[in-house]
Image (cartoon, rainbow, N blue to C red):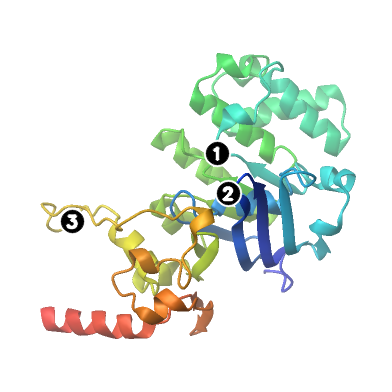
């Protein structure tokens, strides 16, 4: 049974970067929570702020010269933004761990895979070298790397991209964290290994009560493993709901566009895939009103002039759109006409 208090609670998170073009806000007023044993999916196009949000939670950016944070990130009731870097280092990789999208930027090329996994284990679990070595081999085996006793002594450049990814996943899971942030962890993997990694994450999620924030472009993965989903666009949450509602009755026009972009195995396959017109605007050119308005087929003057709030709809859904009720009624009417 889930603890009533969230494992992670993010309140009004804003991430501001200092750039040559001035101060830009990559994450703007994000609020959400994750309970123990829950898998929260985060979806959206590239550039929508998913990765910046997750790395802000971990406080991975240079706070002296590059970034300013606002809001609160409460992990087990403790605000991570109030901790010293020394205190954060005790939590990162131990209770709070992250799988990064690009393994080459996360693995040190001058140390063997085993050295890097053993270091994480010994730093946080205070076990002997022998025990850490055995645990490193076991974690590599769990992630599906063949001959882990041999691979543990190899260097990142000796492994394929898929094996590098799995080694990084082994490192992230080695201390059995309370919360795992997975930033597109299966991008470089073939479907068989992807399924194996997803099974491992779900198994640890259920066995340890580990909370998971799963960032992905793959809505099929969301449908398979996530309990709730957040849809992000240009640094904001535009829709938050349970997984069933996301696929059965999406409310935001952007979410509807993402759903329509999924290839269908059945029905008429002669039609081209749906495409959301335009691209995500740059952070130094954020639209005045609704951020999706320049690309939205339903946008009017209100949308272009005034930004909507994220509002509750029903028991499970939240949506950031002025006209979501009208759009839903319009679509229901067109479906009835088609019948």
Please report the residue visible at 13 percent of the width from the left and 55 percent of the height from the top.
271
In the figure, residue 278 lies in which quadrant?
bottom left
- Measuring from the top left, give residue 91's x and y in whole percent: 81, 47
Q: CA distance from mark 1 to mark 3?
A: 32 Å
- Asked if 176 appears above or below 151 in the picture, the reply is below
- Asked if 268 appears above or below 103 in the picture, the reply is below
The residue identified by callout 1 is: 101
- Measuring from the top left, give residue 35's x and y in whole percent: 67, 65
2 or 3: tag closer to the N-terminus: 2
The residue identified by callout 2 is: 51
Please report the residue visible at 79 percent of the width from the left and 28 percent of the height from the top.
119
Whether residue 177 can be seen here: no
The residue identified by callout 3 is: 266
Q: Residues within 10 Å of mark 2 (few under 14, many from 20)?
A: many
Callout 1–callout 2 Cβ contact below 8 Å: yes
Q: Nearer the viewer, residue 195 or 49?
A: 49
């Amino acid at each position: 049974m889930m603890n009533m208090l969230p494992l992670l609670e993010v309140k009004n998170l804003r991430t501001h970067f200092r750039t040559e073009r001035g101060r830009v806000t990559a994450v703007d007023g994000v609020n959400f929570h994750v309970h123990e044993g829950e898998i929260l999916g985060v979806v959206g196009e590239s550039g929508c702020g998913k990765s910046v949000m997750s790395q802000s939670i971990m406080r991975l950016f240079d706070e002296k010269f590059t970034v300013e944070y606002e809001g609160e990130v409460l992990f087990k009731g403790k605000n991570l933004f109030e901790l010293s870097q020394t205190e954060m280092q005790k939590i990162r990789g131990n209770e709070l761990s992250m799988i990064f999208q690009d393994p080459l930027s996360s693995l040190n090329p001058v140390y063997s895979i085993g050295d890097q996994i053993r270091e994480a284990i010994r730093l946080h679990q205070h076990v002997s070298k022998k025990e850490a070595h055995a645990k490193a081999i076991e974690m590599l085996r769990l992630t599906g790397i063949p001959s882990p006793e041999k691979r543990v002594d190899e260097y990142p450049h000796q492994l394929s991209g898929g094996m590098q990814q799995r080694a990084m996943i082994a490192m992230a899971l080695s201390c059995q964290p309370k919360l795992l942030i997975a930033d597109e962890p299966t991008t470089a993997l073939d479907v068989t290994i992807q399924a194996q990694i997803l099974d491992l994450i779900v198994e640890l999620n259920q066995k340890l009560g580990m909370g998971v924030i799963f960032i992905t472009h793959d809505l099929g993965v969301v449908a398979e493993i996530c309990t709730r989903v957040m849809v992000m666009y240009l640094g904001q949450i535009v829709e938050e709901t349970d997984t069933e509602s996301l696929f059965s009755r999406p409310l935001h026009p952007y979410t509807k566009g993402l759903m329509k972009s999924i290839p269908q195995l059945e029905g008429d396959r002669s039609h081209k895939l749906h495409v959301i017109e335009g691209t995500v605007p740059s952070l130094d050119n954020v639209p005045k009103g609704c951020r999706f308005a320049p690309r939205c087929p339903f946008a009017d003057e209100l949308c272009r002039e005034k930004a909507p709030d994220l509002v509750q709809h029903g028991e499970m859904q939240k949506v950031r759109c002025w006209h979501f009720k009208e759009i839903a009624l319009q679509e229901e009417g067109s479906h009835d006409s088609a019948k």
